[in-house]
Image (cartoon, grey):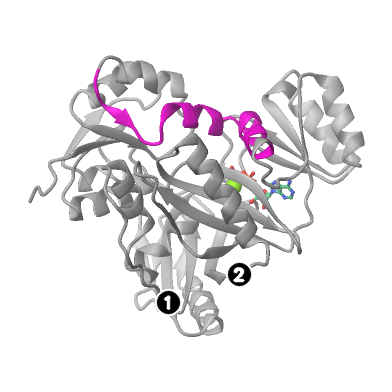
Amino acid sequence: MAIIGKKIGILGGGQLAQMMTQRARQMGFHVTILSDDKDDPAVGYANSWIKGKIYNEDDILKLARVVDAITLETEFIPARTIAKGLGKTKTRCVPKLDHLAILQDRWPQKELLWDYQIPTADFIKITGKDDLEAAYKVFDGELVLKKRLGGHDGFGTYIIKTKTQFELFKRTHKNLETQFIAEKLVHFKSEKSLIVCRNSKGDIFMYPLLNSLQKNQQCFRVWGPDHHPALNDLTKKITSLLNHIDYVGLITFELFDVGSKLLVNEITPRVHNSGHITQDAFSFDQFEMHLRALADQTFPLEVQSTKTFLMQNIVGTSTRKPAIEVGLQGKLHWYDKKANKPKKKLGHINYFGNSLRSLVTLADYDLKKIKC
Ligand SMILES: Nc1ncnc2c1ncn2[C@@H]1O[C@H](COP(=O)(O)OP(=O)(O)O)[C@@H](O)[C@H]1O
Ligand SMILES: [Mg+2]
């Protein structure tokens, strides 16, 4: 089946690429993956595979030559590298490269939020050792140091609450200070996320607000739908930002609920772990929405969802082979990774029903059946 005749390429072959490829194939796209290893989770689902490095412009060019549009599963490939890779081909990238350039670096990302008066935690750019000391003072010894580039799943995020932690950070990051921004430590009530998609015609689709619980700075569980008194104001500001910069594709806003306000923690210009619940609890999932935007399609007029829903991440705690007892209560999505290791995302389980409380019980029950 080839309804659209669009050929798409994905930079990377991990779980996000895998789930996007599965959906893309169902939608009739022809998918090519650029990745290192034939055993990467996405490769088996794709129409074709190019062996290569996603950070290498020549390899990106090999992909760009055979597809109409490319997208990515990590926002950390330098926009310049992708631009060089696309070279003289007519292949487009979604997200657009000027947006990627801003969002992949926490400093211009924070400035963008500032420019559009979107609430976010106070921040300071670290241009040298003095700034680090100043940040410690200004934020009263409670701060978060975040790597400007490449931080994810809590790697690159250092929460400082004591003098000892601050001294340790300084010792272990000597002469690397300028790679960081400092943020005020936020005493939030909960973390949430808002997943938004915009197509090239300017249509905007938003999923309901999601609640997300992190453990060790990594997403553990997500549930919804959630509500917040500040959501209406935030969505207006986000809509105006996306329209103004003419953003295309799916984009995720991670949020802190601080009571009266929602602060944007970070923006990710791609499909997101917190959105995996949309695969089973919504009639159209985040992967489809992103692919529709990528292919200049409209969004569905109606998107249905279950009354309540919950997503449970399965994260490695060892290097042993994962073992899952049969008879789970939720729908398992397994990424088929070659190896296990602590903090590695191995899969997730989606639950949906009428009562959130019962979904929590089911997820707790299932977790006991998983050894990884
Ligand atoms: N300013 C902050 N105050 C308190 N906790 C924070 C702050 N920034 C980040 N965190 C915690 O660390 C987690 C990871 O930080 P984040 O900026 O989202 O980086 P990553 O790219 O690793 O997801 C957040 O989900 C949150 O739990
Ligand atoms: Mg985050």
Q: Relative to 150, is 140 above or below? A: below
Q: Is mark 1 within 8 Å of ligand 1?
A: no
Q: Look at 29% across and 25% down and name the residue there.
A: 52
Q: Look at 28% across and 43% down and name the residue there.
A: 296
Neighbor class of circle 1 (other Cα within 10 Å; few <14, some 14-19, many 20+) is many
Q: Look at 39% across and 71% down and name the residue there.
A: 281
- SS at badge 1: strand
Residue placed under numbered mark 1 in the picture: 352
Q: In the drawing, what numbered circle is on residue 227?
A: 2
Kindly tell me whether residue 93 is visible in this rendering.
yes
Q: Relative to 181, is 238 above or below? A: below
The reply to whether the magenta stretch includes residue 126 is no
Question: 183 or 304, which lies in front?
Answer: 304
* Amino acid tagged 1: Phe
Question: 303 or 138, which lies in front?
Answer: 303
- SS at badge 2: loop
- What is the span of residues highlighted in magenta in the rendered image? 89-114
Q: Relative to 70, is 19 above or below? A: below
Relative to 341, 89 lies left or right = left
Q: Position of residue 313 (x, y in %)?
A: 49, 61
